Amino acid sequence: MLGIYFSGTGNSRYAAELFCREYDKKTRVLSIEDSDVLTAVNDANLIVFAYPVQFSTVPKIMRDFVTDNKGMWRNKKVFVIATMGLFSGDGAGMLGRLLENYGAEVTGGLHLKMPDSIADEKALKRPLEKNKELVKQAEKKIKKSVGQLKEGHPTQEGIGPLYRLVGFWGQRAYFGHKTREYTSKLKINNERCVGCRKCENLCPMNNITIVENKAVSGNRCTMCYRCINKCPKEAITLLGKNVVEQCEIEKYL
């Protein structure tokens, strides 16, 4: 088994690590940004993918990773974990169907409700204790799902036509266009920015650069919210106008 994840605030990384090491403590778990990930994929038979859903679909950076390496998935067995702030319908199925197009066999899926990572919107914000409880419940689901996988009956959340209908009518029919391309809508408040380079170093797309001691964003944001949740001056926003709460998984463990 090999675990592969893309994560903004750590939810999907945490889920992938817990799932894979609950299955076998020796399992490697790598980010799609890791230089060794493709070599590891080549040697693996069963691959566990984990990522945060965006508007009931897959972050563009993860879609591009799978598509750019489409020749590597043939005859691989895959299990898909989708993390989310509320619901996604077929979050796991979206990546599963893409992988099937490239010859993979999707064995199952798992949906995990986790603390919301959209730092600049109030809609899904919860009290600290509620978020800690969400993580505990996710841990229980992961352990149960691993047990079912070992027994040969993997969970099928997000897989199948009913889940697909819920995902489409629940979000993608209205918001699907937001994730088809990278976005240029990342906003940086230059009055707050101090040019510390944290966002520049964190961005998985190299979308942020420091010019004359101020951060400047381009048009290739993948909406992972990594920079927004880590900016020490709360100078970066995307969907909202102000940072409401900065979040990362370590806060809830």
Image (cartoon, rainbow, N blue to C red):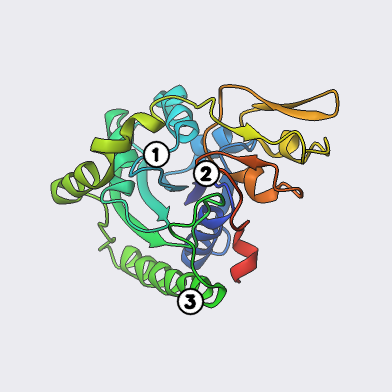
On screen, residue 217 versus residue 124, left or right, reads right
Q: Earlier in the sequence, mark 2 or mark 1?
A: 1
Can I make out residue 156 in this image?
yes
Residue matched to label 1: 58
Residue matched to label 2: 240
Amino acid type indicated by mark 2? Gly
| Neighbour tally class for label 2: few under 14, some 14-19, many 20 plus, Cα within 10 Å | some
State if disc 2 and disc 3 touch (CB < 8 Å): no
Amino acid type indicated by mark 3? Glu
Can I make out residue 104 in this image?
no
Residue 133: which numbered mark, if any?
A: 3
| Neighbour tally class for label 1: few under 14, some 14-19, many 20 plus, Cα within 10 Å | many
Q: Earlier in the sequence, mark 3 or mark 1?
A: 1
Label 3 to label 2: alpha-carbon separation: 26 Å
From the top left corner, tell me how far across and down residue 161 is, in percent.
14, 46
Q: Nearer the viewer, mark 3 or mark 2?
A: 2
Q: Residue at x 16, y 45 (%)?
A: 165
Q: Nearer the viewer, mark 2 or mark 1?
A: 2
Amino acid type indicated by mark 1? Val
Q: Residue at x 52, y 46 (%)?
A: 5
State if disc 1 and disc 3 touch (CB < 8 Å): no
Label 3 to label 1: alpha-carbon separation: 25 Å
* Camera-side residue of 9 and 235: 235
| Neighbour tally class for label 3: few under 14, some 14-19, many 20 plus, Cα within 10 Å | some
Q: Secondary structure at mark 2?
A: loop
